Structures are given as C-alpha cells and as structure tokens.
Image (tube, helix red, strand yellow):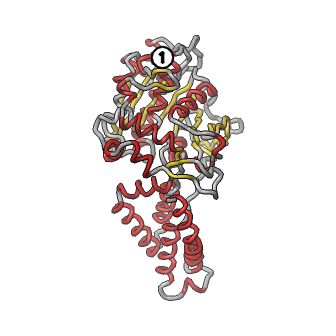
Amino acid sequence: MLYQMHELGRAWMAPFTYWADANARMFSAGDSWLSSIPGASRIAAGNELLHRIGKDYEKPAFGIHAVKVAGHDVPVIEKVVAEKPFCRLLRFKRYTDDVANIKDMKSDPTVLVVAPLSGHHATLLRDTVRTLLPDHKVYVTDWIDARMVPKESGTFSLDDYVGYIEDFIRKIGADDLHVISVCQPTVPVLAAVSLMAARGEQTPRSLVMMGGPIDTRESPTAVNNLATQKPLWWFEANVIHTVPANYPGSGRLVYPGFLQHAGFMAMNPERHFESHWDFYRDLLKGDLEDAESHRRFYDEYNAVLDMPARYYLDTVRIAFQEHLLPRGLWDVGGERVKPSAIRDTALMTIEGELDDISGEGQTRAAHKLCTGVAEDDREHLTVKGAGHYGIFSGRRWREQVYPQVRDFIAAHAASGAKPTAGKRPPKVARKALRATR
C-alpha cells in the first residue's frame, strides 16, 4: 500500500513540478520579458528549487565519450557485452586506431568494476571508470532497477548475485583480469572468487576491495547498528513492498528506492538542507558554476533504484546480522565459501579514515580470511581524511587512491605473457615489476 500511496503522491505533485520548472525558465531566460520584472531572480530561483525537490530523477547516463591518454583524446564507446534479467555487463571500449603517437593499449590490464546494488545506479562510479580508462580495459556491472524486471523473470537472491559475478568473470576471462569491488559487492565478489578457487577454476589476478562490509563486527557504524537492532522479520514487514501496476515489475516484492533515498537523506539532513539553501543563493548571485555542480551531484544522488526483496533480506541477514562470511559458515548453492582457498589472486583492501558506512577494519578483515594469499601479494590502504565516497570518487580517489591501485594491478598483471594453467608469473618477477613502478 505504501508504494501505491507514493505513486499517487508523485502523480499529484507532477503538475506542480512541471509548473515550477516552466516558471523557473520563464523568469530566468534572457529573452523573456518576465526576467526583467522586480524580484524575477528570486522567483526563478525559488521555482527551480521547488522543481528539483519534487521532480522524478531518472537513471543518469555514464556519459563517457572520450578519455585523455598521453595528451590525446581517445574515443570511448559503451557496449553491452552480456545481459541477464537483473544486470547488464558493460564494456567501455577505447578506440586508438586513428590516434597517432600513442601507446599500444591492447596489452593494458583488464578490470571488472563491480558496482554496488545498494540503492544508487552504477553511474555513481562514473569517476572511478573515467579514471581507470586511460590505463585499463574496463568492464562494469550495471544493475537493473528491480521495478523494471517482470515478475516472470523470477527472484534474485544474494546467491544469484554471486553466480552473476562468477559468470561475468568467465565471460571476460580470468587470465589477466583484475576485479575492483566497491562497497556492498566486496562480500559476494569474495564469495565468488573463493568458490571458483575451491573448484580449481582460474581466478582473477587481483582483487581490489574498497569500503565494504566483509566483517561488520569491526567498528560498527550507524548503518550496521540499524541492521542488528531490528530482527529480520521487522525489515520484511516494514521496508518490503510490492511494485505497483504502472511498472514492468508489477507484483514483484522490492525494497523501494524512495525508502532508501529517505534513509540517505535522514543520515545527514542538516547537510542536505544547507546544500539546497546554498543552491538557492548561488542562483540569486548568478554563480552558475556552483549551481551546476549542485545539479550534477543531486541528479546522481537522488536517482535510486528498487532492490529485489530476497536479495536485500539475504544481505541483511548474511552480512550484517549473522556475519556468516567472516565466521566461515556461509553456503552458496550448497557449497561452503572458503576464502582460504584463494591462492593465485593478489589482494588489496582500501578504507576511508572517516567512512561512516563501512567502518575502519571491516574491509581489511578480508586479509584474515584469505590465508592462502602470499604476504607479498597483499596490500592495505587507509585513506586519511576520506569518507565513504572519497575512496572511489573525487580528488582523493584520483590523486591518492588511484595511483596505488594502478601500481598494484600493474604489479600483478600478465605483462604481455599469458600464464599457463591460470598461474601468475613467479614471485621474483612480480617483485621486480613493482620495483620499477
């Protein structure tokens, strides 16, 4: 019923948001006589603020059409290389044939960026992808809004998520693949690679895990506390709702995006209020650059998706309440997840000093579990002064984190010669490569 009421509210508000948008344009356009009347700037600013508060936010585009490599603009094409009911695997293909005097990019390492399925779209990692592209072949998991998936496609669980990651690794090929998981997917990615290793399958050359809930018993945050203070039935009774009839996924049980968004806003209401007030004042002052920066941020931040109910409840129970992964008690499809089985995959963990979503030590816990990974193949980075988003987006990501990620991947890359039987180059060779970076 709540979802239906939300949709009715949106429908009721729609005429007002369209009206506010029209007013904002009429009272700010230079060729409109309304822009010259007294108080026009205030009317325009107030109406745009009202429009942005009440409007629907659709999934943004990645919008990556070119990257700079050695001072040259290299065209980039976004391609769908695999498609499943709940996820598309995207490839950002670089084209250098028409660019003279540029490095050979065919031998660059391949990276699979596993985006979180935790409220926002994969486009939240736009900066991550753009930064990786000059030095890597990049693939990204693009999770589909559950309300857009017909009920006939079946359910989607955390086990299914693990299976998707395994399939994508096989699809790309693990012999020179490096997997970067951001936030929530650190758990299913570690499970997928653990299961593949235990079966004797070839595993990626390296795993880079960023700000994820591997063991939420370490430095629990407000997010962790919420998950443990309420029993599982409470979440099922209070946050799981049915997709209404105006979407393709009508009848599907989901954790709705609008509830997640309300939770995001409630975590820092003062900051969001101040941000919107600053936006209003920027419009009055004519500070178009800062106003556009606000628009870009909230176009992304306010665009949320519905999560499949079973997947969401599985994640709450397995990762946050019962801690099955760090306790060694997690079974996926009847197979026990044993990170200790991973031997031929290097491991790097990254945490933000001020992360209020995944506390310090939660991601680093992966090192305690992956006992089969040699000490020389492990690294950990704590980013001083960085919050959750700062470790994969923004200036700190580009200037402090990425150079170390790039060097870690390069140190464990195939370096042109493909290994046999899924094995990496000898340890001496890997040390020599790291020493040259």
The quadrant of the rendering that contains the C terminus is top left
Q: Position of residue 270 (x, y in %)?
A: 33, 62
Query: Who is closer to the viewer here, 16 or 133?
Result: 16
Query: Is 128 on the left or on the right of 83, as rendered?
Result: left
In this rendering, the count of numbered labels is 1
SS of the residue under disc 1? loop
Residue 369 placed where, x, y %? 37, 23
Above or below, 173 relative to 36:
above
Q: Nearer the viewer, residue 411 or 355?
A: 355
Q: Is residue 256 something that shows in the picture?
A: yes
> For the point 58% across and 11% down, which residue is it?
420
Number of residues whose C-alpha sits closer than 10 Å to that of mark 1, classed few (under 14), some (14–19) or many (20 or more): many
**Residue drawn at x 71%, y 38% as measured from the top left:** 98
Please tell me in which quadrant of the rendered image residue 94 appears: top right
Comparing 374 with 287, the one in front is: 374
Say whether residue 36 is left or right of residue 346.
right
Q: Is residue 224 left or right of residue 339?
A: left
Q: Is residue 253 positioned above or below 433 on the image? A: below
Q: Extreme left residue here?
A: 219
Can residue 385 be seen at all in this image of the molecule?
Answer: no
Q: Residue at x 53, y 36 (%)?
A: 157
Percent x, y for residue 228?
33, 42
Residue at far bottom of view? 38
Residue 383 found in image quarter: top left
Task: Decide: is 113 above or below 260.
Answer: above
Residue 141 location (% of width, % of height): 57, 38
Q: Residue pushed farthest right?
A: 98
Camera-side residue: 138 or 102?
138
Q: Amino acid at mark 1?
A: Asp
What residue is pinned by disc 1?
344
